[in-house]
Amino acid sequence: MTAGSEGRRAVTVAILSTIVFFTLVGIAITHAPGWPEVRRTFFDWGEFKASIPEIARAFLLNVKIFAIAEAFILVLALALAVIRSLPGPVFFPMRMLGIAYADFFRGVPTILVIALLGFGAPALQLSWVPLSTTFWGIVALVLVYTAYVSEVYRAGIESVHPSQDAAARSLGLSHWQSLRKVVLPQAVRRVIPPLLNDFIGLQKDTALVGFLGSVEAFKQSQIDAAATFNYTPFVAAAVLFVALTIPLARFTDWLVLRDRRRRQATGV
Amino acid sequence: MSEALVVDGLHKSFGTLEVLRGVDLAVAEHEVVCLIGASGSGKSTLLRCVNLLEPIDQGRIVVEGEEITAPGVNVNRIRRRIGIVFQAYNLFPHMSVLRNVTLAPTLALGTSRVQAEAEAKELLSRFGLADKRNDYPDSLSGGQQQRVAIVRALAMRPDLMLLDEVTSALDPELVAEVLEVIRELAAGGMTMLIATHEMGFARDIANRICFLDEGVILEQGPPEQMLTEPKEPRTQQFLQRIINAGRL
């Protein structure tokens, strides 16, 4: 058998098994006793069309929360990772603080941090403390995700072989110059896929800010569902979230591929 | 002839393993000294200590009259004067060949980008790498990468070059092009301390060969004498093994 016919055979088998699999799952679901009811309450096309403009508008708040939080997280997490990689006994207290921070905010459930800050901070009634629930939701997400993302950065920094730093230092570069120009650029490139993973997590967790009362997509769909006793608005919100993550995932794939091509490129 | 490098009673341990046990060595200006010895004899460690990549435990190192191991010395300033080339090239994979060469002059010496690039291009063409300047290291052969690494070190205009088994990671057919570069440096009067397994090359290029054994320089002398009639039994044994392996 030639390689070509083997390849065609593999594609045929893949297509057939996919069709069979999804047909079976489809039959199982649509023949479930409760299916007509589920179909009416979750997959009502009329409800979908009616609710999606409002939810899409509310979803803009999710996008805003995500964009603002992400910008802070990328910078703060990198700073935290750099602090934790500082060498020498002088920096021991800073390293220890960094570890305590990461341990704490990775340990407490995100929804709890949001609740504590969102309800607690405004309750202080200090004139300079913002009252906006969205503001405190963003702060909570930044605190939690900075802890996660700093671990990703740190793994990247540690994956750069010490000989790269040695080469930079041997040329007379300072520790900081070596970190900035040699170690971090390589570290960040390597962790782009896991960074994206955390971005997607953050995108989804913007829905938790609705818990404080900010009307984002999930909150809006809750309001719609409560008004009509139909859950289709939840499906509409889910569709919007997925629609945002898929392009982001493809974009990252493209970044990784571009970097690999460039590194192996012969210029001119 | 003044001394470019003096190593005096150098001791260095890694944990409980004492790698250097009192090394004394002097290299004169424009002199080429080759370090030979078995793997683990301390050749690389000695070079790394001279470049201050490893803190030393005891002794002192003097470069061009300045004690570089004295407390409070600015290590970055010292390293700018001492070039080192590693066995595994250690080029920066995320930068073009040209940027690899200009990075340190622009950052550490404050040379303008324009001038650093002009100098880098001149050095690259001198070593037959002019057409590679926009390539990335991963696309080059091992021999080309090592020549770029040498150019990168030279771009800092060092007083002294340290070469750490620079041909050991290369395919045999690529060794010659790298050795040719080093010969040219020697001909230009560069002071060099070279750790090597290439005995034929050491014989051609070295003014003096030092045999490092168990962390001390056991014997040293002119190449002909060291390679044909060494006095110490350990040196004789080492060379016999090299000859048996067909490397001399």
Image (spheres, rainbow, N blue to C red):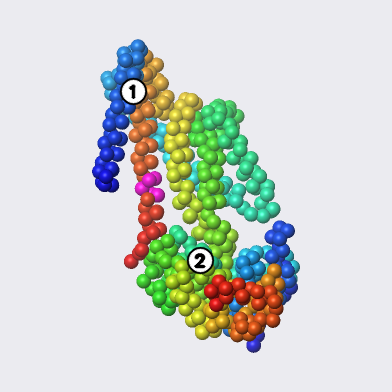
| Vertical position of residue A27 compared to residue A76: above or below | above
In this rendering, is residue A59 above or below A89? above
> Residue A251 appears in which quarter of the rendering?
top left
User: Which residue is at a point 62% across and 67% down the rendered structure image?
Assistant: B39
Residue A262 at what x, y percent from top left?
38, 57
Chain hosting mark 2: B
Q: Amino acid at mark 2?
A: Ala
Expressed as whole percent of the image width and height from the top left, the position of residue A149 reads 52, 42
Q: Quadrant of the C terminus of chain B?
A: bottom right
| Residue B49 visible (yes or no) | no
- Viewer-closest of A132 and B65: B65
Check disc 1 and report its element: helix, strand or loop.
helix
Q: Give the residue at mark 2.
A: B169
Dot 2 alpha-carbon crowd within 10 angstroms: few under 14, some 14 to 19, many 20 or more: some
In the rendering, at what x and y percent does residue B56 appear?
Answer: 70, 66
Chain letter for the residue marked with disc 1 in the picture: A
Alpha-carbon distance for marks 2 and 1?
56 Å
Q: Looking at the image, is B140 positioned above or below residue A259?
A: below
User: Who is closer to the viewer here, B183 or A150?
Assistant: B183
Toward which corner of the image does residue A103 lie, by quadrant? top right
Where does label 1 land, which residue? Answer: A25
In the image, the segment drawn in magenta is A252-256
Q: Is label 2 on the same chain as label 1?
A: no
Residue type highlighted by circle 1: Val
Q: Is residue A255 magenta?
A: yes
